[in-house]
């Protein structure tokens, strides 16, 4: 009951969402995602190959383009659920109203837009929620302009912890390169994470296969449906990623320096590999569905055979004993002493004959 | 019975429709849509950034191109079921006979035609009819020529109420831009509305999924079929929209000024997203079909198992009691006092053995 | 029996057809279609905007190209089953042997061939045969050269009656334009007729859907199979039409004058729309198949449930009455007066318990 | 048993085949096809428009390019199972080692290779084996160089008998044209033969459909499977043919003179038509599968209904007669004279009621 | 039990794999494949047409580019599970960090990368494991730079034994050509081996088909599922191979000399043929699935028919004998001497009638 109420409320909430947005002017910032109540915050990394400065929490007013220094600036904004603050940041950066709308509207399709002076990118981060055993997606928006990169994520906690540590460690290509390489590093991590999630799903598929080949139970079908649904949603999220990264590599963009496009092509290959894997898994699930149905049907057939064997043996026998239960005055068989054993003999012969027939037909 | 009559009439009506049209000269205006009996009417918005004039009802003769002023003119015509009046408007605007035909023929495929001096566009507005719980489509034709936009819709009531209010409010990009931006605003609203409809279908799919995972009933299949059909028709309507808007953005059209193409690309992305969502929902419905069939088959199997268990237990027992109902003169068992309890014992043993066997086989 | 004979004969007839053709030199004229026994005949329309002359039957020798006048000549040949006469016409017109072969070989795929001095076109006319309730196709070949158009159809009776009347009426675009516009008018009529046929199929699908949602009977499946087959054949006929008309519009053909390509693009759009509709109907038929199968399976399940309910109630009862039909000497129950009503009580209790159980399980 | 042995041997034979080839140097000639034991032989046609010479059997050493005369040379080699002889011919003609390998390796995919001085072509001849009622394929390799054409086939007997006769008859386009037109004539015959085979399959499908709509038997499924498999293999053979001929027509090949490309485009159209037909037949087979399954399931349902009707009528009746077979001392009903007819009345009433119920439910 | 433990461990092992990689810097070498414990080793072939030197085991430090001589150098490295050693080789060769990462990361998608001074290639070797009756894949990386080729494989034992022997034999095209032809020879062998594996699968499919047409057993489905899965994985491995070799042939690469591209096009054709074969086999497996399901369902139907025949014959008979087992005082039939034989006559008549009915309905 409780679950249904939750669903009903979720539905109520969502029903009004798009309805609210549909009539608004393009570029109006309306947050339509899950409700969140923490304050939007930002952190800043400033680094060259030699120096690095990390401010864990900066004022949102500090986020600007156009630093003349040769440092790389990475502003990482956590939370997009306060449209006014995002609008403020947008004004400071001089972002187009459509880009701002896309940052806030978290059910965006992955895409890349080239706004002359800056590059705008939307991608999907995918993670596996251990507690609910399901796949979650989060939207990451990246704005790249010269030596500055501004990234926006929806919620606290991200997959970039390792990136921060590599930044601090220094003396690596990451520190020697510009903001475009930083962007590549983020995309690389996101796509690498796809494989972590796909591996989890692959393991679950394999486990399910072993169970099904052993013996199918009803819960397998629910599990299989869950996996199929997750693959459908993963596919919806990762297919456009391929286009996005493909566009980035193909366009001779002003935003990519040095051989960053070589690195991006590598991410592109991984992305294609992830899609191949998803398609393969989808093929596998349909194979598992076949096995499941077969297993269920085999069990049913065994039940039916049992019924048939029992019934076909005993129904004729019951008829025979019925005959000699009749009360006719003139039934000469009833009077001879060997009739009763003879009936037993007949019935044993019939049973034997039937068992032999079923054996021959390989019914059991 | 009543419903069938309605259907028969509808069919009769439709059967003659295309038959009527097929033999006519190209460009002959014949209205083939639903019967409507209100008079075609038109409204006019004239605006610059500073001034705006709204006439809720104008004479159809006033609709013309070629105003020399720098105002934007938006003529919005409601109703296309009076071919003569549409023909008259067409003559005033100098429209090609094929464009006129497309305006009146409301089962048109979405498309864009570039007639040198003006641009002609057909799109589909989609809405969710709350009373009949079904998706409805309406055709919108747009003619764009310089600073004038003429739009034609089929029926009273439209999705542009919010647009009118934004126009009146003023001091927004909409008022500062030309008729091409107005066209974009209309397309944006229409595509945004697709998501409202898709969200409704998504909610119904989710609700159906919960019901099916709980317990399938026969009505679920009718519901599932309805959703599948709606997705098929939505797909047919939205796929060509993508081509249309894609053509608009790609062509270096004389009709798009400033950065309106940037805005249209945004609408294009949303359109692609809507198509992705439809395909995802179609995948989901086939998954739900599997669950439904499985659930039905599971229920049936349970029924069969019950029958089998009852029958396989009682058929042998009935045989045994039949034996001792025979009337042979010489049946020694009948005469000893412990025979009756012994038969009971035998029967209880058989029942116990069978129950143990079924338990082992996990039949219940 | 009679039907089978017909089929066998048809098969015999067809088996030899391609076998006969396979070994022949390319360009050998062999008629492979249905047997027809009327004499090939031709009619002629000569018109300018001002004048028109119609000869209902002309000598086949009169069919030639190269009239120097500014009149449009339309030769309409009915029947292609006399290869020698077609060959004669071909010689008069100077047609390539491959074009002639295509005119006679009526199972051609729609195509357009540009033979430098003339254009050759094969399309499929589709009609709905009211008496046999099935779709029929007929091949139309068009040869276009300057101001002359020669068309070939297979059988008497065509869809161009309306065209003839429009020609005679005069003072329309058709009379003012050249032979290319005449060709467009013919294509437009043919494609318009596709919608008439598709509408018939759509109506039948809808009727079938109502029946199936009501109650499925065996004949529905035969009907559904018939509709599926017709859609398969329509698809095979209409898909290449799209290519053909697409080629006509794209190529900057010497054969199209003025804005005839604009008109052809309109036909092209209709053709694409027809294909969309076919695909949509195919999706619908597979949905109807699901409903049919489900309905059949639901009926079967109801039958099985009835059996199960009857059997599970009466089999145990029969066992009980069997017990007291046994003839043991020592069965104390048989001797007490309340035993018989007690057995009745027991049996009523068992029946009630079972009915309650079935009710709870929602079996009926 | 015998059949299985044959299969096992076939398998043994084939297993070693590719294993044998896999490790060899590219260009090593190894024959992997069926075992054949006749000696490779060749015939020669030399012709101009005026003269023709036919040698039914020539020495393999005579096969060379480079005849300076204006005659057309057609060397037709029967058998490719003696790699050394093929190698010898290859040396005489100066063929590339890869082309030679392709001639001998008879499981080649159809393709066309342009080796600067000559054109190499592999295509598949398809025939219908009347005795085994199955489709057979044979590989044809064509080497075209100037006025010389060398063709290689696998086995005795070919589809070119008609071609030879046309050659001898003379005074046709074939004799007036070069070796490229001869090549076209061969391709044309091969593709025409596809339709002969497809027509056979079409007839079998139609016959099967009539049988299935009449009554399905188990053997239908084996037949349907056979047709499906043949369509799969035909598809695999004909699809690449389309590419091959398409490449020939598109490339401005030095090897095609005059308007031979026009003729090849005609063959290309036929090839596309053949593919359309195969796809249509595949759609039909899946429709027939549905009918078959339905028919089987309908028969089964009828069986089940019979069982249910018999059982549900007689099980309650048997219970009733069981009641009055009990041996209780105090059963007052047994003593009244009208009880027996009353029981009969009751049983007739029950039977009638049930029959009425089944009738109402339309069970029979 | 044991098997499940193994699976659990495998899973545990794999789960950590991608998790380990996901957070690392791009270009970090981490081996994620199966655990191996032999030391990485290398062998060297140096050859011209005249001379050849083979060192079975060289020091890894000796692997370098840039030998000025006109000899071809082939370094063949066995094992990539020691990242530090691979890194060392990479440094000596001046390989890009991404290429190195791809060498070590053995679950790479086949691809080709052009790093200006050298060409990097990843392909999949496929083999059939006789002991486990399954398909295995191994990754081969090739680095090609001028006259030097370095190849990396995962495990001991490879498919190149025949290549080594051909190298040693000398006086063949292989010895006369450069390192690019060596690369082609390796690709040719790998693709040839695909056919060996596909042939094995084809044989197993054929054997399965014979079994299924004979009689289906439950194990067939497991076998069929295994074959389907192998085809899915083969497809995933071979599809990208086509792209890779296609890219190699199309690009006017600096790395291909002479007519090596001609040879590569041949490999490309074989690759396409392999893909065709896989698709054909996939179609076949779905056909076999249909046969299996049908066969199972036919067996079940036979079981049901047996039950129905037995039950429908004996249930009415049992009812009749039940009637005359009733104990009513007034049952006149019981008293006449011919009643008992008359009942027998009735029962025989009923049985005969039913058998005749079943025969007519073709139930057995």
Image: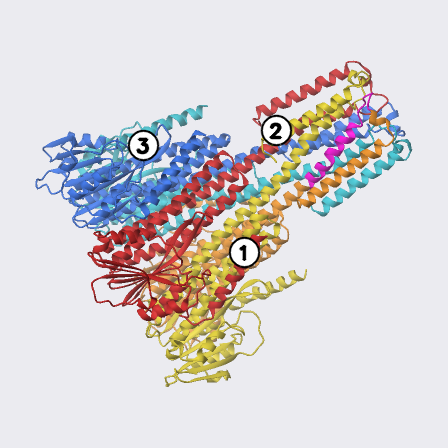
Chain colours: A cyan, B blue, C red, D yellow, E orange
Q: Nearer the viewer, mark 2 or mark 3?
A: 2
Residue extent of the magenta highlight: E306-331
- Marks 1/3: CA–CA distance: 65 Å
Q: Main secondary structure of the magenta part?
A: helix
Name the residue that disc number 1 marks. C7
Name the residue that disc number 3 marks. A33
On whether residue A239 falls in the magenta region, the answer is no
Question: Residue D173 sits in which quadrant?
Answer: bottom left
Mark yes or no: residue E147 visible.
no
What label sits on residue A38 in the rendered view? none
Q: Chain of mark 2?
A: D
User: Do the residues at pointers 1 and 3 share their chain?
Assistant: no
Q: Chain of mark 3?
A: A
In the displayed structure, D38 sits above or below A39; it is below
Could you tell me if the residues under marks 2 and 3 are in contact, i.e. CB atoms within 8 Å? Answer: no
Could you say which is closer to the camera, residue D142 or residue E171? D142
On whether residue E327 falls in the magenta region, the answer is yes
Could you say which is closer to the camera, residue E328 or residue E268? E328
Question: Residue A43 sits in which quadrant?
Answer: top left
Name the quarter where the C terminus of chain C is drawn. top right
Task: Using a 10 Å C-alpha cutoff, classify the residue at mark 1 as few (fewer than 14 neighbours), some (14 to 19) or many (20 or more).
Answer: some
Could you say which is closer to the camera, residue E93 or residue C199? C199
Could you say which is closer to the camera, residue D17 or residue E348? E348
In the figure, is residue D136 to the left or right of E245? right
Assign a secondary structure to mark 3: loop
Q: Nearer the viewer, mark 1 or mark 2?
A: 1
Mark yes or no: residue A101 visible.
yes
What label sits on residue D357 in the rendered view? 2
Residue C305 locus on image (x, y percent): 60, 31
Could you tell me if the residues under marks 1 and 2 are in contact, i.e. CB atoms within 8 Å? Answer: no
Residue D100 locus on image (x, y percent): 45, 74
């Amino acid at each position: 009951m409780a679950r249904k109420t939750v669903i009903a409320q979720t539905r109520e909430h969502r029903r009004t969402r798009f309805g609210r947005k549909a009539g608004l002017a393009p570029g109006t910032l309306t947050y339509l995602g899950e409700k969140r109540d923490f304050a939007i915050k930002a952190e800043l990394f400033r680094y060259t190959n030699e120096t690095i400065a990390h401010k864990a929490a900066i004022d949102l007013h500090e986020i600007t383009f156009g630093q003349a220094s040769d440092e790389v600036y990475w502003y990482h904004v956590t939370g997009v659920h306060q449209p006014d603050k995002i609008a403020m940041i947008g004004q400071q950066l001089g972002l187009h109203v459509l880009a701002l709308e896309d940052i806030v509207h978290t059910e965006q399709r992955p895409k890349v837009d080239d706004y002359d002076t800056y590059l705008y990118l939307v991608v999907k981060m995918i993670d596996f929620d251990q507690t609910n055993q399901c796949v979650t997606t989060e939207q990451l928006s990246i704005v790249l302009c010269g030596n500055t990169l501004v990234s926006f994520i929806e919620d606290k906690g991200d997959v970039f912890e390792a990136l921060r540590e590599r930044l601090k460690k220094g003396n690596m290509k990451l520190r020697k390169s510009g903001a475009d390489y930083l962007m590549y590093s983020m995309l690389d991590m996101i796509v690498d994470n796809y494989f972590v999630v796909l591996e989890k799903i692959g393991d679950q598929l394999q486990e399910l296969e072993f169970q099904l080949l052993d013996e199918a139970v009803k819960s397998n079908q629910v599990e299989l449906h869950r996996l199929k649904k997750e693959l459908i949603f993963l596919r919806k999220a990762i297919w456009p990623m391929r286009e996005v990264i493909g566009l980035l590599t193909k366009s001779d963009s002003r935003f990519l320096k040095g051989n960053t496009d070589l690195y991006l092509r590598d991410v592109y290959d991984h992305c294609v590999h992830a899609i191949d894997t998803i398609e393969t898994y989808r093929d596998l699930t349909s194979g598992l569905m076949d096995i499941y149905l077969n297993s269920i049907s085999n069990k049913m057939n065994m039940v039916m055979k049992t019924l048939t064997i029992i019934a076909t043996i005993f129904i004729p026998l019951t008829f025979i004993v019925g005959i000699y239960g009749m009360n006719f005055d003139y039934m000469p068989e009833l009077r001879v002493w060997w009739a009763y054993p003879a009936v037993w003999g007949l019935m044993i012969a019939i049973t034997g004959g039937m068992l032999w027939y079923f054996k021959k037909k390989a019914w059991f």
